[in-house]
Amino acid sequence: MKGKPLVLAFLAVGFGETVSQVLLIRELMTNFQGNELALGVILANWLFLIGVGSWCAGRAADRVPVGLSAFVIIQLLFCLILPVQLFLARTINNLIGVQPGEMVGLLPILYSSFLILGPICVLHGCQFALGCRILAAGAETPARQVGNIYVAEALGSMVGGAGFTYLLVHHLHAFEIALVTILLNLMAALLLLRPWQQPEGLLTRSLVGPIILILGLGAHSWLSGNLARADQLSREWQWTGYNLVYHQDSVYGNIAATESEGQTSFYFSGLLALTSPDPDIVVVEEMAHYPLLSHPAPRTVLLVGGGIGGVLDEILKHPVESVDYVELDPLIIETAREYAGTEALDDPRLRLILTDARLFVRDARDEYDVVIVSLPPPSTLQLNRAYTKEFFQEVVQRLTPQGILCFGFPASEAYMSGEMIEHNRSIYETTRAVFPHISLVPGDWTVLLASPSPLDLGEIRQRFGERDLETRLLNAPYLEYRLSQERIERGLNLYQAEEGQINRDLRPIATYYNLALWNVMFYPAWGNVFGWMSGLNLGWVLSPAVLAVVVLTAMRGKAGGTRFHNAAVILAIAATGFAGMTLSIVLMLVFQIYQGLLYQRIGVLVAAFMLGLAMGGLAMAGSVERVRRDVRVLVSTEVAIIGYAFLLPFLVMRLPQIADLAPRLPREVPLTLLNCLAGFLVGLQFPLANKIYLGTTERGLGRVAGGLYASDLAGGVFGALLTSVFLIPILGMTATCLTVVILKLASLALLMGAA
Amino acid sequence: MERTELTRRKFIRLAALTSLAAAGAKIGCRRSPMSSRSTPEPEPSTEARHWTRMEGKTVQCQLCFRNCTIREGGRGFCGVRENRDGTLYSLVYGRPCSVTPGSPMEKLALYHVVPGSLRLNLATAGCNFRCSFCHNWEIATRAPEEVKSRDLSPIEAVDVAVENNLEFIAFTYTEPTIFYEYMYDIARLARGRGLRTLLNTNGAMSPDPLKQLLPHLDAVNVDLKAFTSEFYQKAVSHARMEPVLTTLKVIEEQGTWCEIVNLIIPTLNDALDRIGEMCLWIRDEMGSGIPVHFTRFFPAYKQTRLPPTPVETLEKARDVALEAGLEYVYIGNVPGHAANSTYCPNCGRILIERVHFSVLSNHIEDGACPFCSQPIPGIWT
Ligand code: SF4
């Protein structure tokens, strides 16, 4: 009777979970100038807290009789807390006493995201365990009911993810999106209580009033403009000390502009991107003129990123015929036009291309004399794509025989730390793996030039005189100093002294070095940890896995069959949680590499995984009560996941060929299907594990479902923390998938031992 | 029978698993991407100077305003001065981490010292300040053992300058106060071999050691970070401003050539009224002939979100300084800005034309303006 509305309510819960996750994490990432490590910590916190909520509520639910009203109260709390947490997430830097403009280290990120996410996540966890308990109470098929909830939540998440990316973010600001979520949840709550059917119980009846009150309040604050004011106020607090003149969310993040004394500064997702009208003249002039002066007669130029920051103006000072300028987010160009009045954007020689640079270079037909990549260092996996061997190979294809690739990276004239040398050396080595001729201009901003033909930087000085450029910084004595043969050789020697690690698409080691560099800024002593972790190999995963299997199996005799059996089920679910998280991170990375535009499609990817999860759950929930030899079935799902993880790298390597086989098929289809399949396999396990566990224990359903859910999430926590920071960058994609294989093999061995 | 069956099956299963996983491990194994970092124990190089014994084996360092009380086995705030058995040692004597020959004089922001000349830069690890906007945090915030340093005795340091045909040795990057003994010995030796020495300091050295050092130095550049104690307290990790002002007065008394740098950081120290007060103080205490450099901030270290200083702010600061009567006021870190050059305070003609740290022309003759004979203070030859 109460089953259907409750399952429906979980659609709203799932929706609310995903949307609040995206909203809060986006704010936190903007404030913390997030990189992969920050994201990993935040995600891990998220999963951990939900796990805590689910575990606690599960235990409580078995002790006290809970009814619908408890569930509705939690839903109400969620609705009240979400806007508050959103406000806090945005203004967190003020709360933890960070100076305006100061970057924070990992520890503040850890505890502040814990505090911001805590209430919301714990509530979500509670909802899950409570829902299971309520639905299953007295039901003949408890495992199936839990499965239904799992499925409904996954479906809700899917709708939330897709809805956010395709609809909400384009039309509403964060507080409005939060309100949509709240309204949905309130309506679900009403549906549960059914006030029109004269519900029994004082508590239940007295809840209807508050729900309607909050509904009314929400609607009123939207219509009266209070919501917009909250958005504006929180933004201003977030930018305390700055004169914020513009802010806007896009699919790619947040764009903000501040103004002071005639100078406008632009921030993309919290990162200072450019300053107008006076940029960092040294960087801007060196990045544009060194490559253009190294070329005898540059006609065609490709500029990747950073153009409106001043490089474009410098390029156009040369008598070039065409400049192709690739920028990802159209909003950046619009903002720059409006607030920086960048005249260069109207130059007839300019062709503006609003797309992913990797996609553009891969599919481009034209050839270029000079390619300038003006992007920040590879601090994220997204940025790293412009520093890999594969990218450089694509660039070479587009260069004329005397063409030149140019990019820069921070270094230091005073002292280069081990971390910095390793970071830069990796980039240098990667370039050298593709280009036969490399030279560089060392400095606090080091400019690297690479070409298929020999390079002579001495010619820069001569051509500078000939081309009669109007520059602010460059002049003959400056060039003589910067381009002295001795300095150049000293710089080259530093990077050539040892062999560096090559940065690959599927093994983005430069990102790891960059994280190490960032981290050592706050915690110098951790430098060793990063150095030590960089020795990571599969043996580190293998030995403990084998050891755990051996030890646990040995202990089996003493502990008795049931406990061992249940431990095996829990571990299997935890390993599956890990596998689910890791495989979907791998697939996102691959998608980003082959497809670009991850941010536009991330909704589809998440939705595909969630859809798979829901279908898997649904399929299993439908048949779980009929399944006899359930451990057998669980073992087969284990084998399926292992097979998947084992085959994934091979499939990924063959993706280009697969694309050639069916040229009409949109390129993202295979990856989306793969993601869906991963979700499906993971989803199969949960209802089954529940049934197995329930069959062997006296414990209540709430506790079992809560506990299993928590172990699923615990696996996810490890996946979130380890995969994008350590496993993928250090081991590479193939070995990361093998890590999943090893862990799942271990859990499989335990399960078989138990059977 | 049943039993052995089971065990065997289990054994085979385990063996298969292990070999499979081992094969995987092999694929994943590769050379450690980060070569192991050597962290040598710092040598107890030399006994420190300017400290006293307190009770027991506790000592007090009196080299800078922090006056650290250091217990046996402990180190001072700067991390490079260690109490070993009741004696204070410098851990960085003869252990520079930065030895860079050929850096232009203008980069140090000494505009009135032999324009266009080159120098040798020296620094060791450690610092007695902790600025959130530090450009050299990789060495300034770390202990000696966390930094790659080399052995270079004072004699060898002077040799490096001579070999590279450099006439100047500059102590810079981190705060040279903390490697006082090393600096002092090099400065003395360098003078003996006809070289000149420069100090780039935050001004927080105590007066006594400073007075002893100054006779061996030719020019000093003092970073006056702000004119509010609050800034020193907050942005520089509980530092104080008075010691810096005292340092400036001592330098003025002893007559060593000095230039002042003020890095203007948006929102942190850009209030014009404070800048005005600072300029008046400089004029009254140091005289109007002392060059003052307002330099443009760029995001660094933990301050990556603050924008660069608006050029307008720097120009306003310069106007305020000129109004206060200061005669040589520069804008630094804005390549191509007119206020990067030197003008005659009397006739207003351009005397030294600079772009960033390149000198394009120098008209000063015999320490004076060739157009109106106004003497221009500085070290010109
Ligand atoms: S030099 Fe170092 S040890 Fe001595 S007082 Fe200053 S900070 Fe403390």
Image: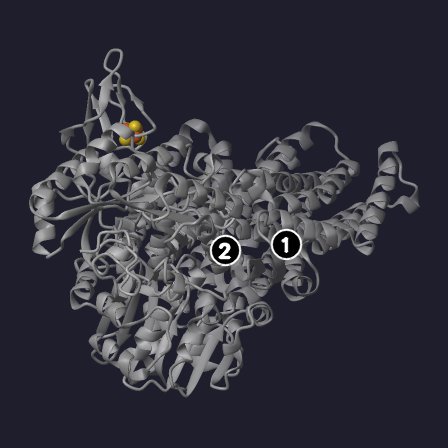
Q: Quadrant of ligand 1?
A: top left
Residue B260, x across and y down, in percent: 35, 46
Q: Residue at x 89, y 44 (%)?
A: A195
Q: Is mark 2 within 8 Å of ligand 1?
A: no
Residue B123 in the image: above or below residue A295: above
For residue A54, side relative to residue B204 (left or right): right
Extreme residue toward the top, this view: B56
Q: Which mark is residue B316?
A: 2
Picture quadrant of residue A432? bottom left
Residue A623 in the image: above or below residue A48: below
Q: Distance of mark 2 from mark 1, alpha carbons?
A: 59 Å
Mark 1 Cα shell of 10 Å, populated few (<14), some (14-19), many (≥20): many
For residue B164, side relative to residue A337 (left or right): left
Q: Nearer the viewer, residue A149 or A392?
A: A392
Please name the amino acid that badge 2 sits on: Lys
Q: Residue at x 13, y 55 (%)?
A: B166
Q: Which mark is residue B135?
A: none
Q: Chain of mark 2?
A: B
Residue B370 in the image: above or below residue B41: below
For the residue labelled by badge 2, is the local secondary structure a helix, a strand or a loop? helix
Q: Nearer the viewer, residue A450 or A46?
A: A450
Residue A649, x across and y down, in percent: 39, 64
Is residue A623 visible to the viewer in this orientation of the structure?
no
Residue B295, x across and y down, in percent: 40, 53
Residue denoted by label 1: A154
